């Protein structure tokens, strides 16, 4: 009998992969001596992020090199591997084909959300699904990215999360400049500028600042190289983006600015400290409130944490 398990997670981003990573690990731990396969999208960079993961050894991209696998190709994939169990974190009619593929290839156990999508939080739903599917109670909320070698803790390295999927989800650059200057007055920090080629103009504005330490850009690094660079950092401060989730899954204290994305999603990981506009208890998509989170407010919130660790 096959001991292979397939996990289907088709949300496209690096952050999405991180949010579902604890759920994938729970499946693996609940099914010892099984070989775990992950079917996902190429933009998650799962092959780089999970390179040293002890639980997930097989990464399959449904859209490798931008060519989406056909139904026939997926059928052959299912048939050849003879999966014993399939866990699918998907909703909706367009995912019916994975149910059909499981049935056609005699998958013994199939777990999925359902046909009709409900209005519920992504993280909350994944947690309740795993509790039901695996018959467990989830009490520890943290992700874990495994590396070949971990970096030592560096209390002088701060990650500045500039990346964002849209300008409405990005903290204003003038606020970043103000915060960096305030932090620079405290001590000599090295600032890791986390983002991609799309943030080049922002990088240029920040690196013009005269600071005691240095600026380190991740602009030209791939995900695997970036993870090694930020590992061991003091803390992360920035937008709700892929590197924010990576930082949290590396065990780094992660201050995330929520003004236009669901703050509820932060609850999957205890290392994420959500910073919302003053007086706001929860944020959602299209709140357009990033500019309401002032730099002085952010500075005061993280200052006590700085003082508790370093002697200024």
Image (cartoon, grey):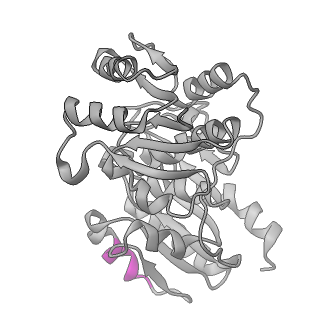
The quadrant in which the C terminus is found is bottom right
- In the displayed structure, would residue 264 be above or below residue 46? above
Left or right: residue 96 compared with residue 246: left
* Residue at 40%, 63% in the rendered image: 174
Left or right: residue 199 compared with residue 161: left
Residue 170 lies in magenta, yes or no? Answer: no
The quadrant in which the N terminus is found is top right
Furthest toward the top, the residue is 116
Residue 35: % across, % down: 55, 45
In this view of the protein, can residue 206 be seen by the observer? yes
Of 113 and 77, nearer the camera is 77
Left or right: residue 243 compared with residue 206: right
Magenta stretch: dominant secondary structure: helix
* Residue at 39%, 41% in the rendered image: 39
Per the rendered image, the range of residues in magenta is 203-209
* Residue at 70%, 77% in the rendered image: 155
Residue 247: % across, % down: 57, 60
Of 173 and 80, nearer the camera is 80
Residue 141: % across, % down: 70, 41
Q: Quadrant of residue 285?
A: top left
Residue 207 lies in magenta, yes or no? Answer: yes
Of 104 and 217, nearer the camera is 104
Tally of numbered discs: 0
In this view of the protein, can residue 294 be seen by the observer? no
- In the displayed structure, would residue 162 be above or below residue 27? below
Residue 192: % across, % down: 49, 74
* Residue at 48%, 18% in the rendered image: 113
């Amino acid at each position: 009998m096959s001991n292979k398990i397939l996990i289907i997670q088709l949300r496209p981003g690096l952050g999405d992969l991180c949010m579902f990573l604890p759920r994938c690990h729970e499946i693996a731990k609940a099914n010892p001596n099984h070989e775990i396969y992950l079917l996902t999208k190429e933009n998650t960079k799962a092959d780089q992020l999970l390179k040293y993961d002890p639980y997930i050894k097989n990464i399959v991209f449904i859209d490798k090199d931008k060519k989406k696998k056909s139904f026939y190709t997926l059928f052959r994939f299912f048939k050849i591997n003879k999966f014993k169990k399939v866990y699918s974190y998907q909703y909706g009619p367009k995912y019916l084909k994975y149910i059909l593929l499981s049935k056609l290839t005699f998958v013994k156990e199939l777990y999925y959300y359902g046909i009709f999508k409900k209005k519920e939080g992504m993280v909350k739903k994944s947690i309740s699904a795993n509790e039901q599917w695996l018959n467990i109670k989830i009490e520890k909320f943290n992700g874990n990215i495994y590396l070949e070698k971990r970096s030592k803790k560096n209390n002088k390295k701060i990650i500045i999360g500039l990346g964002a999927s849209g300008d409405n989800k990005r903290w204003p650059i003038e606020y970043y400049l103000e915060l960096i200057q305030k932090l620079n007055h405290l001590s000599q920090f090295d600032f890791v500028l986390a983002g991609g080629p799309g943030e080049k103009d922002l990088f240029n504005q920040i690196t013009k600042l005269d600071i005691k330490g240095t600026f380190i850009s991740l602009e030209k690094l791939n995900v695997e190289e970036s993870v090694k660079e930020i590992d061991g950092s003091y803390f992360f401060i920035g937008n709700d983006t892929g590197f924010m989730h990576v930082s949290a899954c590396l065990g780094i204290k992660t201050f995330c600015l929520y003004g236009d994305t669901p703050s509820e999603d932060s609850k999957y990981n205890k290392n994420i400290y959500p910073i919302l506009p003053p007086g706001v208890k929860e944020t959602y998509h299209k709140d357009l409130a990033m500019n309401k989170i002032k730099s002085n407010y952010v500075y005061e919130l993280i200052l006590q944490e700085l003082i508790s660790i370093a002697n200024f």
